[in-house]
């Protein structure tokens, strides 16, 4: 066939497979198992670190929300005290100026 002896065609198939394997290795499509395991381990480590950071942020958020709720309650109490004080001071002012007397 095409003037080549039959042995060349038989060796050509093996050489073609070898060239294909080398090409896959060079192009990165065929990797050793150790390399794949290293990549997976690195990915798993990064995911674990991200999960830890997510948990820390979640705890910080919950602590912040708790502090905000306490602050809101305290401000509500202070506002009630200020309103009461304002009412008392207004009543004292009216009595002092004589506008609050009835009778």
Image (tube, rainbow, N blue to C red):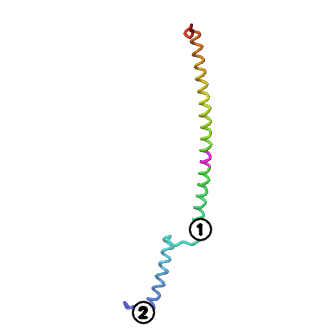
Residue annotated with mark 2: 5
SS class, disc 1? helix
Image height of 46 relative to 86, above or below: below
Residue 96: image location, x then y, percent = 59, 9
Residue sitting nearer the eye, 5 or 91: 91
Q: Residue at x 58, y 13 (%)?
A: 93
* Mark carried by residue 11: none
Image height of 6 relative to 58, above or below: below
Q: Quadrant of the C terminus?
A: top right
> How many numbered circles are shown?
2
Image height of 93 relative to 74, above or below: above
**Mark before the other along the chain sequence, 2 or 1:** 2
Q: Residue furthest front?
A: 103
Side (left or right) of 11 relative to 102 = left
Does the magenta segment cover residue 32? Answer: no
Distance Cα–Cα, label 2 vs label 1: 45 Å
Residue 37: image location, x then y, percent = 59, 68
Q: Residue at x 59, y 30 (%)?
A: 76
Residue annotated with mark 1: 37
Residue sitting nearer the eye, 80 or 35: 80
CB under 8 Å between discs 2 and 1: no
Q: Main secondary structure of the magenta part?
A: helix
- Mark 1 crowd level (few <14, some 14–19, many ≥20, 10 Å Cα): few
In this picture, which residue range is highlighted in magenta?
A: 56-60
Q: Quadrant of residue 45?
A: bottom right
SS class, disc 2? loop
Does the magenta segment cover residue 57? Answer: yes
Residue 43: image location, x then y, percent = 57, 61
Residue sitting nearer the eye, 3 or 77: 77
- Mark 2 crowd level (few <14, some 14–19, many ≥20, 10 Å Cα): few
């Amino acid at each position: 066939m095409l003037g080549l002896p039959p042995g060349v065609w038989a060796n050509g198939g093996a050489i073609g497979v070898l060239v294909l394997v080398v090409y896959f290795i060079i192009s990165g499509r065929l990797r050793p198992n150790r390399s794949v395991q290293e990549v997976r381990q690195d990915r798993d480590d990064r995911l674990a670190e991200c999960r830890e950071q997510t948990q820390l942020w979640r705890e910080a958020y919950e602590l912040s929300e708790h502090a905000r709720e306490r602050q809101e309650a305290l401000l509500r109490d202070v506002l009630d005290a200020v309103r009461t004080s304002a009412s008392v001071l207004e009543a004292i002012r009216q009595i002092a100026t004589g506008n609050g007397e009835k009778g």
